[in-house]
Image (spheres, rainbow, N blue to C red):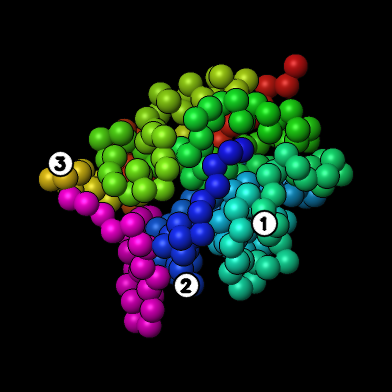
Amino acid sequence: MTTVFQGHQYDLSYPDGIENHWWHLTRNRVVLGEVRKVVTRGSAALDIGCGRGITVRHLRQRGIDCFGVEPGITKAISGAEAHVKFGLDASELPDEERSRYDILLLLDVLEHLHEPAKVLASLVTRFTRVSNIIITVPARPELWSNWDEFYGHQRRYTAGMVVEVANLAACELVHQSYYFRPMYVPARVLSALKVRHSTQAGAPQGMRKALHRLIASAMLVDDVLPAWVPGMGIVARFRPSRR
């Protein structure tokens, strides 16, 4: 992969304590749910482009054998230090290590890539044991904002675009769904009003942590809303079509 955050982007998007933000709390729950559908005895997951290892730590705390690799240079959050490698592309991992993983995670990674399907196809070739690829991407082009521009996004995805990426990468799309759906309408209004977003993510402190847990709990409505209701993100699972 060619996309790498710069130092100031890590500082702005991953301040200490950002793992307590409702956005990360919700995405971690969504990803854990997808991983649990496919994890088996002996499974190992690799989070590619893992940032500071927020999801790596979350999954490991829940019994998932998960490691992370991040092409940029930053600092792992507490509890993930021994399980994340920095300054390294996933394809550069030794053959023996790559052969361990049957689950790949690309969480809010593909939107940074000019040719996401080509990258996925390359990963399938390099990780010969992989049977499931779980992705998350920002959804709905109408929600495009200065946040997307600042962090180098190439696109926000539609459901059709996810299908296209899967097909071009010679993968079977097993499942996809929106999440962050309660936030879609507020985000759409802000977008229509052309409100600019702060590019600095705020890490909740003190009592604000409880507020963010409450907001994340409200996101459980994702599980009961009709499938057609849009959201700010898409989670999908691919299965490589090996020939």
Residue at 68% x, 33% y is 123
Mark sitting on residue 17: 2
The x, y position of residue 97, in whole percent, is 82, 47
Q: Does 239 appear above or below 192?
A: above
Left or right? Give the position of 240 relative to 197.
Answer: right
Q: Residues within 10 Å of mark 1 (few under 14, many from 20)?
A: some
Q: Position of residue 52 (x, y in %)?
A: 57, 61
**Residue in view at x 65 percent, y 26 percent:** 121
Give x and y (percent) for residue 47: 63, 49
Q: Which residues are magenta?
A: 195-220
64 on left or right of 7 = right
The reply, left or right, for residue 13 in relation to residue 196 is right
Q: Is the residue 161 above or below the residue 73 in the image?
A: above
Residue type at mark 2: give it. Answer: Gly
Looking at marks 2 and 1 on the same chain, the residue that comes earlier in the sequence is marked by 2
Q: Residues within 10 Å of mark 3 (few under 14, many from 20)?
A: few
Q: Which mark is residue 192?
A: 3
* Amino acid at the residue labelled 1: Phe
Can I make out residue 237 in this image? yes
Residue 129 marker: none
Q: Residue furthest left?
A: 193
Callout 2 secondary element: loop
**On residue 86, which mark appears?**
1
